[in-house]
């Protein structure tokens, strides 16, 4: 019989060598406290071609931490790493998939705010009521919120937040219906699909902390460029969405 996992926590990592060991310890520690051995909880970290020692650190940690699965891939961008982490969790037959980031900007205990509502929705999304990011990122988040409402008639407080719990069977439908090639910010598309497919829980407040280590992968003008790219991808996605929702709910 194929082994299943009650929950898989998945996260991308890029140049997080200063903090990745602490992050792995925190999240696997939570899994040990919250789940039994028979639940087979796992943490999947996808190293997206880091230029520092992130990949090597993950390989060494995995040798002594049975809950950690380390995946090293060539650099493909944050969105690509997120999708590959999702696919790895589905490949390993995870009943629930929880996605977060590796930059230590979230409190592990907030996981339970989503977990306790797992029977109420197939898709549960947190939101950063107070967000510690650069002003340009906060402005873009507000623009994105308005754009999603205008494009899709859908209000989502924090559509790209890396703090979400998804039922594995539902996640498979979402991944199967993602546009190809993988969008720059696939979590936005996943949130829109889930919302339009009738899922309800999209505003669980969670704590966001200031970043003290690591490297923001998208900066300054490049951030504006990728936002324009995402805008065009969302416009194209708008035309396909009605058919996608039918397939998801079919």
Image (cartoon, grey):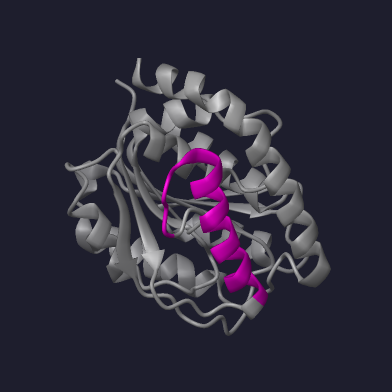
Height in image: 8 above or below 49? above
Res 56 → quadrant: bottom right
Residue under the image location 41 percent in, 18 percent down: 246
Task: Say which of 205 and 176 sits in front.
Answer: 205
Residue 214 in sight from this viewpoint: no
Q: Is residue 150 magenta?
A: yes
Look at the image and tell me in which quarter the N terminus lies.
top left
Task: Say which of 8 and 184 sits in front.
Answer: 184
Residue under the image location 57 percent in, 47 percent down: 82
Height in image: 13 above or below 98? below
Task: Say which of 144 and 209 sits in front.
Answer: 144
Q: What are the residue bounds of the magenta stretch? A: 136-157
Res 85 → quadrant: top right
Residue 248 in sight from this viewpoint: yes
Residue under the image location 39 percent in, 52 percent down: 164
Q: Is residue 31 magenta?
A: no
Percent x, y of residue 34: 21, 59
Height in image: 150 above or below 216? above
Find the residue positioned furthest to the top. 250
Number of labelled discs?
0
Left or right, 48 with reference to 240: right
Left or right, 75 with reference to 37: right
Left or right, 21 with reference to 179: left
Left or right, 14 with reference to 172: right
Residue under the image location 29 percent in, 44 percent down: 40
Percent x, y of residue 159: 48, 53
Percent x, y of residue 160: 52, 55
Name the magenta segment's main secondary structure.
helix
């Amino acid at each position: 019989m194929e082994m299943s996992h009650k929950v898989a926590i998945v996260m991308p990592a890029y140049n997080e060598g200063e903090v990745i060991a602490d992050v792995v310890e925190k999240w696997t520690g939570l899994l040990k406290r919250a789940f039994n051995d028979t639940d087979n909880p796992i943490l999947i970290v996808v190293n997206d071609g880091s230029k520092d020692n992130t990949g090597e650190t993950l390989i060494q940690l995995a040798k002594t931490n049975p809950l950690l699965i380390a995946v090293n891939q060539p650099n493909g961008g944050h969105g690509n790493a997120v999708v590959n982490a999702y696919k790895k969790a589905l490949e390993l037959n995870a009943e629930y998939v929880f996605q977060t980031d590796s930059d230590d900007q979230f409190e592990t205990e907030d996981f339970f705010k989503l977990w306790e509502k797992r029977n109420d929705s197939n898709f549960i999304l947190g939101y950063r009521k107070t967000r510690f990011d650069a002003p340009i990122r906060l402005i873009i988040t507000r623009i994105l919120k308005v754009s999603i409402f205008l494009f899709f008639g859908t209000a989502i407080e924090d559509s790209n937040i890396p703090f979400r719990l998804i039922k594995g069977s539902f996640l498979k439908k979402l991944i199967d219906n993602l546009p190809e090639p993988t969008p720059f910010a696939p979590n936005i598309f996943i949130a829109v699909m889930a919302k339009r497919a009738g899922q309800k829980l999209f505003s669980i407040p969670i704590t966001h902390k200031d970043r003290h280590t690591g490297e923001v992968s998208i900066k300054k003008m490049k951030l504006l460029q990728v936002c324009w790219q995402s805008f065009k991808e969302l416009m194209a996605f708008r035309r396909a969405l009605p058919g996608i929702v039918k397939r998801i709910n079919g």
